Image (spheres, rainbow, N blue to C red):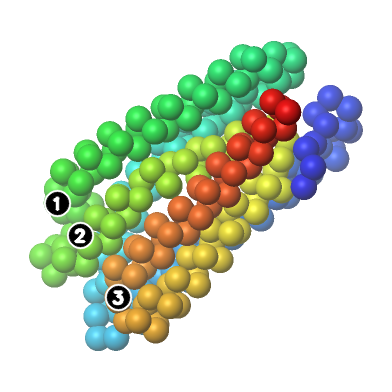
Amino acid sequence: MRQNDFENTPMLKLVMSLAIPSMIAQLVNILYSIVDRMFVGQIEEVGNVCLAAVGICGPIVTLLSSFGTLVGIGGSIWLSMCLGQKNEKRASQILYNSFVMLVVLSICLTLGFILLKHNLIYWFGGSDALYPYANTYLTIYTLGTFFALMSIGLNYFITGQGYATIAMLSVCIGAITNIMFDFILIRTLKIGVAGAAIGTVVAQFISCMFVLCFFKIQIENQTS
């Protein structure tokens, strides 16, 4: 889990050390999305309707989380360039500015999507039968926008510093947490589609805390 040495590591070894953890993280993301929908589809009596409602919310959720990717990819590349130039002060400033941007975006997006959720559901193919379930899922998910954007956006900055394995771990921790809470909330407590949304938000919260703790430790090590 140590940082990759971008300056001295051979190119092939460096590419593999960054690419393999990133590929595993993407694979885990896909797998836990599939498992998540399997739990939703098995909800008694209304499983097929709930699955369709979550499917309607899929593109909306992707649109919401894409803002974290926007800040994460753009900022992390710039940060990596500054680190390569040995300009750590500038790199720290970029990280701070990106963090503030993620906070501002999360507040604006939460308010905007809550106000527009009714229209969004119908724009993306919702119906009167699906609306109650889609509305429940989207409302709960949107309230966790801060954690989603932070975990997604800041994860790129971890990879950008060479800690690809730690970035992968944050994704895996979130995925395992989500599956566990799906089992507890949907299968055991019978909360339904709300349980799927709550499980996702809790998973994003834990992943976000993991990422923030990583940066907290980094800052403490630099100041000590």
Whether residue 99 sits left or right of residue 139 in the image: it is: right
C-alpha separation, residue under disc 2 versus residue under disc 3:
13 Å
Q: Residues within 10 Å of mark 3 (few under 14, many from 20)?
A: many
Whether residue 152 sits left or right of residue 16 in the image: it is: left
- Of labels 2 and 3, earlier in sequence is 2
Question: In the picture, residue 9 is in which quadrant?
Answer: top right
Tell me the number on the disc at residue 135: 2
Picture quarter with the C terminus: top right
**Amino acid, disc 2:** Asn
C-alpha separation, residue under disc 3 versus residue under disc 1:
20 Å
**Amino acid, disc 1:** His
Tell me the number on the disc at residue 118: 1
In the depicted structure, whether residue 198 falls above or below residue 95? below
Q: Please report the residue visible at 61 percent of the width from the left and 14 percent of the height from the top.
A: 90
Of all residues shown, which one is farthest toward the left? 128
Say if mark 2 contacts mark 1, CB within 8 Å: yes
Q: Residues within 10 Å of mark 2 (few under 14, many from 20)?
A: many
